[in-house]
């Protein structure tokens, strides 16, 4: 049986409650202060986050950096925000930022 939206949100929220948001902000700050990290982050988001401060992305989630224009790095996969073939979809995301840069974690 497919997971309902309520089940999806409940299980995801429980995992989000365990996240170290201070570390997420530290990653955003590091990238804000050294934009060359953004190129490396685009190629290996989890590896760069881990190298900056040991941040571990919870199972099932993935991360992006959002800039001042709300552009995601790496870009989201096509169809994630819906397309004509998907009648219904959900997305849960949280952000922790420093100035104009945020680390975005989503599922």
Image: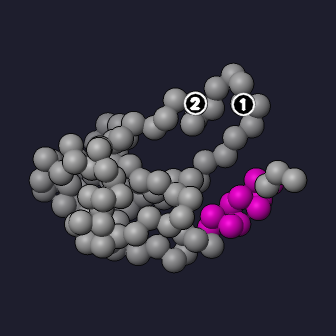
Residue placed farthest to the top in the image?
84
Residue 51 percent coordinates (x, y): 24, 66
Is residue 60 in the magenta section? no
Left/right of residue 68 with respect to residue 17 in the rendered view: left
Above or below 89: residue 98: below
Q: List x then y, in percent, for residue 100.
A: 26, 50
- Give the residue at x 68% y 67%: 11
* Residue pictured at 35% horizontal, 58% vertical: 46
**Overall secondary structure of the magenta section:** helix
Local SS, label 2? loop
Contact, mark 1 vs mark 2 (Cβ under 8 Å): yes
Q: Which residue is mark 2?
A: 79
Magenta-drawn stretch contains 10: yes
Work out whether residue 70 can be spotted.
no
Question: Would you say 83 lies left or right of 30 here?
Answer: right
Residue at the spot 47% in from the left edge and 54% down from the top edge? 62
> Is disc 1 placed on a helix, strand or loop?
loop
Examine the image and state in which quarter residue 21 appears: bottom left
Q: Is residue 102 left or right of residue 58?
A: left
Q: Is residue 11 above or below residue 89?
A: below
Q: Which circle's residue, 1 or 2, is located before the other in the chain? A: 2
Q: Position of residue 5 (x, y in %)?
A: 76, 53
For residue 77, the mark is: none
Q: Whole-Å distance between the Cαs marked 1 and 2?
A: 9 Å
Image point 21% across, 43% down: which residue? 39
List x then y, in percent, for residue 14.
63, 73
**Coloured how?**
one colour
Whether residue 47 is visible, yes or no, is yes
- Quadrant hosting residue 69: top left
Magenta-tinted stretch = 4-13
Q: Give me the disc on residue 86.
A: 1
């Amino acid at each position: 049986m497919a997971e309902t939206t309520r089940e999806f949100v409940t299980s995801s929220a429980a995992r989000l409650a365990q996240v170290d948001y201070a570390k997420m902000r530290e990653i955003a700050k590091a990238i804000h202060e050294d934009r060359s990290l953004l190129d490396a982050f685009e190629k290996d988001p989890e590896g760069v986050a881990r190298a900056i401060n040991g941040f571990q992305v919870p199972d099932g989630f993935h991360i992006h950096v959002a800039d001042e224009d709300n552009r995601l790095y790496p870009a989201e996969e096509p169809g994630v925000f819906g397309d004509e073939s998907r009648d219904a979809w959900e997305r849960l995301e949280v952000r922790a930022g420093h100035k104009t840069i945020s680390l975005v974690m989503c599922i």
